[in-house]
Amino acid sequence: MPAISACIITFNEAARIGDCLASLAFCDEIVVVDSQSTDATVQIADAMGARVLERPFTGFRSQKQFAIEQARNDWVLCVDADERVSDALREAILAARDAGFVDAAGYRFARLDHYFGRFLRHGNAYPDRILRLFDRRRGGWRGTREIHEAASVDGPVKTLAGDLVHYPYRSLEQQLAKTQRYARMMAEHDFARGKRASLAKLVLSPAWRFWRGYILRAGFLDGWHGLVYAYVRANYVRQKTIMLWLLQNGQAVADSPAIPAGQPADTTTPPRAEG
């Protein structure tokens, strides 16, 4: 039967990498590509049996592509340090593997966010299905966009049962800082590609993001957690649009690059790009 290599990129994830690796114990190999962490990330990963490679950070997409290229097996499972494979998802992956992965070039599954004490099961947060298990001979982390990167494959993609459990934020302060940083990165990316903001988007896009997630997709069913999440995500869209507006009008949005070369502020999943 096909073997599976789990691939993770890390930077200063000592507090979370252990649980992540434990959830991947069913894989035949675990590859960790670390961006010169200054904490105990490398030591923990090494002690838990992962094959650790050091590489300066060049971007989310390129770092993840490098990781799958180092894997010893063609079937790769890509996760972030703040994600865990649930029991149900593990069983679904093993069942697909035992069948020889004959029906697809890749598999997607839902991601379940833990948000300040509650799992979000509605709104824009869930099911957020993502392609993370695939045959690298038929796809990978393609393209040139280094933020909001996504894997793609040539061939059919099937959906597996079970959730990839996601612990994206340690605190509200960390979430706000993370969303602002990625809003800036996305605005700079869009501006470089010729995309422009308008006054209509400046006013309507954040409102639509909130309305769609909180009302149309029933985010209100997640209680106050769903309300806070919807507000913060709408604010991400507002920040991104304002920054793009400033850039296209010749104004600086910051004093320094969003992420200095070789110094990733966070290698875990960026906020969702939609909106």
Image (tube, rainbow, N blue to C red):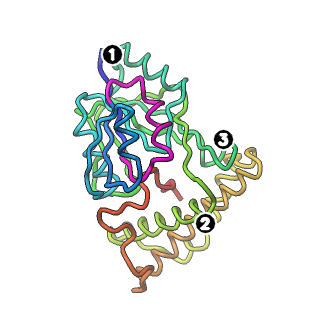
Q: Is residue 263 above or below residue 73?
A: below
Q: Secondary structure at mark 1?
A: loop
Identity, as a three-letter code, of the amino acid under mark 3 = Phe
Give the mark nearer the N terminus: 2 vs 3.
3
Which residue does the numbered mark 3 point to in the structure image?
A: 119
Which residue is pictured at 45% across the width and 47% down the height?
14
Which residue does the numbered mark 1 point to in the structure image?
A: 100
Identity, as a three-letter code, of the amino acid under mark 2 = Asn
Which residue is pictured at 38% across the width and 77% down the height?
256
Quadrant assignment for the N terminus? top left
Confirm whether residue 267 shows in the render: yes
**Location of residue 94 in the rendering, given as x and y in whole percent from the top left corner:** 43, 19
Give the mark nearer the N terminus: 1 vs 3.
1
Seen from the viewer's position, the closer of residues 166 and 190 is: 166
**Location of residue 17 in the rendering, given as x and y in whole percent from the top left corner:** 45, 42
Give the mark nearer the N terminus: 2 vs 1.
1
> Which of the 4 image quarters holds residue 200?
bottom right
Q: Secondary structure at mark 2?
A: helix
